[in-house]
Amino acid sequence: MAWFSDSGYWLGRLVFQRMLAVLYVVAFVAAARQFRALIGARGMLPVPDFVARVPFRAAPSVFHRHYSDRFFALWSWSGALLAAAVAAGAADAVPLWASMVLWAVLWAMYLSIVNVGQTWYSFGWESLLLEAGSLAVFLGNGEIAPPVPVMWLLRWVLFRVEFGAGLIKMRGDHCWRDLTCLYYHHETQPMPGPLSWFFHRLPAPLHRVEVAANHVAQLAVPVLLFTPQPIAGWAAVAMVVTQLWLVLSGNFAWLNWVTIALAVSAAAPLWGPPSTPLPAPPLWFEVLVLLATAGVLVLSYRPARNLLARQQMMNTSYESLHLVNSYGAFGSITRVRREIVVEGTADAVTGPETIWLPYEFRGKPGAVGRLPRQFAPYHLRLDWLMWFAALSPAYARSWFVPFVARLLENDRDTLRLLHRNPFPDLPPARIRARVFRYRFTTWRELRETRAWWHRTEEREFLAPIARSALHGRR
């Protein structure tokens, strides 16, 4: 089938696969470094408890068959090593069938983690990585020309990511329609980056231009992906530029980088074919790709219908394999930033004279003089959930008390998730949590105080509590 493959996509496939493999490395490393405190056997939401109540068919995972912290660590680090080998070119150094196996193993290994990750793995970029990873299985390697059907399926993913995000904004918060959402977003986003303060202080008219440009990038440009080249390629380049703008302005794990990888694959023909045309794939590969393409089209019915629905859902998986999903972000914008400040004291009895020392998180705002750091594409799961908890205690109902209990024990694995532990020698006698309203300082305040944030206390989130009071609540 002459139409089935096209050497002109060679560079787009190459860059997409290498970028995706690197992002797999990041995802596996993040899982390996954070799991013990979050979902380990003694974690806040233990995997053994989850698999005991959720059947395999609802959340397929190797950990239904066996779980131990040692096995999970081995699984995660093995995934990181395999992904690193693929990023270094291992999938192009083996026969076609073996290359497909490598990509399928990466997908299955990360699926096993996501499906037991519970609320810590409930973000849209988890499904996006898995969906892109499932398509990578059928992209082939350097010994054949890229299959055109799969390259078009990558565009279909990119379209749903961008167009879905654009639609949910227009259907959601009115500030997207009156072009004022970025008056607030750079300040109130879940985890600001080192440049977020400067983005927030841009003039208001420029913020309105940012919103208008976002609408063009997410509602008009994605449609051009399905037009002839070079229009589709330049549309993809425009998406890369807008995603890099988001990378500079905040921390959204690997969401932006997977989107960039998808866009690069769509821009591929702009760079032209290789010096030597690649051979056509074997018949068995063509059959597998066509079957996979048909399967994706069937599974696309519900995500496509969701795009047209008035009550559009965002970041939704319709089946437990995360093969074809719905995406979207920031349908509503928070106008005020609230942060939970967790503090401990060595005093067994607290009073007005009690000295409370704050715990500092790695990514989320805490000390007002500390400039936000850049962590993306690495994902700080606890920091992100703390942002949601500040919006409503309901978001933290399942894990916040276990988190506090582990702070009261100076649990080593939990403390590794934090930037600063104020009790390095002995655990605190009591822990409390308070909600503060945060805002970026003005230029004048920054010069005078050298503080990036200004904060005022609003309410109590958790009254002072001792370890003995938590027995039976974990």
Image (cartoon, rainbow, N blue to C red):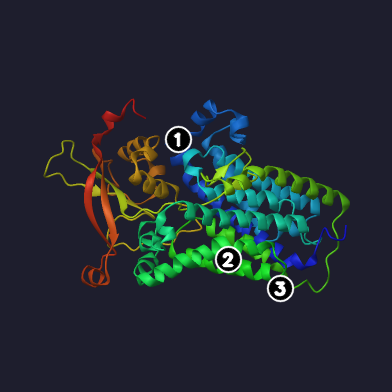
Residue lying at 51% horizontally and 34% vertically, measured from the top left? 47
| Label placed on residue 338 | none
Of the residues under marks 2 and 3, which one precedes in the sequence? 2
Looking at the picture, tell me which residue is in the foreground, 417 or 58: 58
Determine whether 56 is above or below 314 in the image.
above
Find disc 1 in the rendering and name its residue: 45
Find disc 3 in the rendering and name its residue: 271
Determine whether 91 is above or below 60 in the image.
below
Nearest to viewer (mark 1 / mark 2): 2
Q: Position of residue 420 (x, y in %)?
A: 33, 52
Judged from the image, the secondary structure of the residue bearing numbered disc 2 is helix
Residue lying at 45% horizontally and 48% vertically, measured from the top left? 381
Label 1 close to label 2 by CB (< 8 Å): no
Residue type, label 1: Leu
Disc 2 packing (10 Å; few <14; some 14–19; many ≥20): many
| Label placed on residue 239 | 2
Which quarter of the figure has residue 302?
A: top right
Nearest to viewer (mark 3 / mark 1): 3
Residue type, label 2: Met
Looking at the picture, tell me which residue is in the foreground, 392 or 217: 217
Q: Position of residue 436 (x, y in %)?
A: 26, 50
Q: Position of residue 25 (x, y in %)?
A: 58, 54
Judged from the image, the secondary structure of the residue bearing numbered disc 1 is loop
Judged from the image, the secondary structure of the residue bearing numbered disc 3 is helix
